[in-house]
Amino acid sequence: MQSESKKRIWRGLACLAVLAVLAFMVVPPLLQSQPQADGDKPKKDVGKSSYDQIPPVLLGQETFATVMERDKAGKVAVMERQMALLNERYDLTRHVDEKCQMTRGKPIAVGPTARLPDGLTWEKLAALSPDDICDKGLFPKGFLPLPHVKHEVGGMVFPPLTIKAVPRLQRFDVDFDLPDHFLPEFPPAIFLTPRPDLGDVSQGKLVTVNNFQEIFQGILNDKDLEGMRLLVTQFPQQQFNATFDRKTEHPLGMQGVACFDCHVNGHTNAAFHLEPSARPQTHRRRIRTVTLRGLNVQRIFGSQRAMKTLEDFTQFEQLGAYFDGSTVAAMAKGMNVMDRSVQVHMMAEVQSLLTFPPAPGLGIDGKLDPRKFKADSPEFHGQTLFFGKARCAACHPAPYYTDNSMHDLKVERFYKPQMINGMKATAQGPIKTFTLRGLKESPPYLHDGRLLTLEDTVEFFNLVLETQLTAQEKRDLVAYLRQL
């Protein structure tokens, strides 16, 4: 009886969703045709509503085959536009440090990669005021907000190595845009808080619904094994679902995506999509997939939405971010409503077990172990800068290098609002303080991935925080960040 009652409720909600769509299609034109009353002030143009973005294919005006054919035909132009932007912003050539590697051996990329305006050096640029940089248009384009590869549509986009391992994640309308040498290693290592003695428990494998039992049997308890199963189980998502409004033709892709498709092995593969809260579409932010390592020491979740518990994040990602914040789309495509006290709890508990990779250079206070580094080493100089002149520790205090808060860097001081490949680059607002532990294994950086290397990150914050670091100080700071 209870199950039948739930079915009736969901059928009723689905009907309401259809009526809402029809209402928003009909009512706005009627309202627009009414003359304004005397004395009424014209409304501020804030852009289209969520419902204006419902594609014709969902309304029965086009077939899936028509949309797919058009998307495939336009893919070359979409990718050429994005790659032209990236090459204008960055030097995408592969430059890596073979001596500095991630856990499983991938060398990290080095920079800076962001291109400077002609005739400028980083030191000359940092000597200018934000107003001068803005007025003269000198802010490096690689430091501007980064648009989605197809910002007008958005949705999850996966790197080539992930797609090679999991072909169902291939979209027919876009490809990933950043080269692999700027991304985390694949598949990444897995470290667990309750079993540090085991080190990397991944066995060098990509965790999937087919092998999670084999990998974690005898390591996780029964409850956490079920939480892991849910994290690697596909659920419908905006671009990966069984409706005609999808961007995959792979039959398994029609079942949806799993949490660990983006958060590979509980870490990240740098997949990206658009933040679901903002409207109109032009004002939405590209967001890169952040690592799940160290969630047990974090108290806010989501780059800008500041959800307060890991359970909130786990539950509402599938209700919100999976469907671009649209309940109408979620109901049409297969909303996954999970039980908070059972399924959500189990998934959150597993995520809270994922921890940082070992940092052998750090002591119990999270700072450098003085027995392992000389006082005049670049790393020690970098630590002094981190907790002093560079002002990093104001938001990233030891031992976990996050203050669990939100901060607005006000980067818009340095540039004028502008359209970039379908995205309006304007004030970005506050973003959460991401933990810096394991930093070298989680490129690219900042919430949208606009900073490709640690060197780019140091140059960006030197400019935005106006700290006036010298070239040597910046090198020392990078040396310290590599130890975290």
Image (cartoon, rainbow, N blue to C red):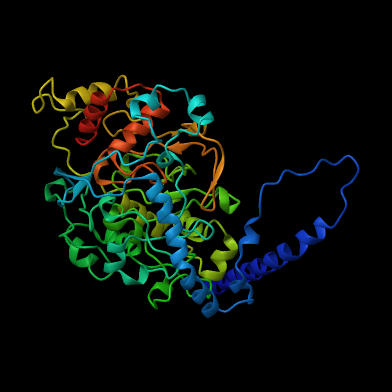
Measuring from the top left, give residue 336's x and y in whole percent.
47, 65
**Can the viewer see residue 236?**
no
Residue at 43% in and 50% down: 85
Q: Quadrant location of the N terminus?
A: bottom right
Residue at 32% in and 51% down: 351
Measuring from the top left, give residue 368's x and y in whole percent.
17, 28
**Can the viewer see residue 109?**
yes
Measuring from the top left, give residue 173's x and y in whole percent.
45, 68
User: As displayed, is residue 279 above or below residue 372?
Assistant: below
Furthest toward the right, the residue is 38
Measuring from the top left, give residue 87's x and y in whole percent.
37, 50
Furthest toward the left, the residue is 371
Q: Quadrant location of the C terminus?
A: top left
Q: In this view of the protein, which residue sits in the foreground, 167 or 313?
A: 167
Going by the image, does 440 lie left or right of 141?
left
Going by the image, does 269 lie left or right of 55?
left
Q: In this view of the protein, which residue sits in the foreground, 441 or 325?
A: 441
User: As displayed, is residue 350 above or below residue 403?
Assistant: below
User: As displayed, is residue 438 above or below residue 264?
Assistant: above
Q: Quadrant of residue 234?
A: bottom left
Count of numbered circles in the view: 0
Q: In this view of the protein, which residue sits in the foreground, 131 or 437?
A: 131
Going by the image, does 316 lie left or right of 120?
right
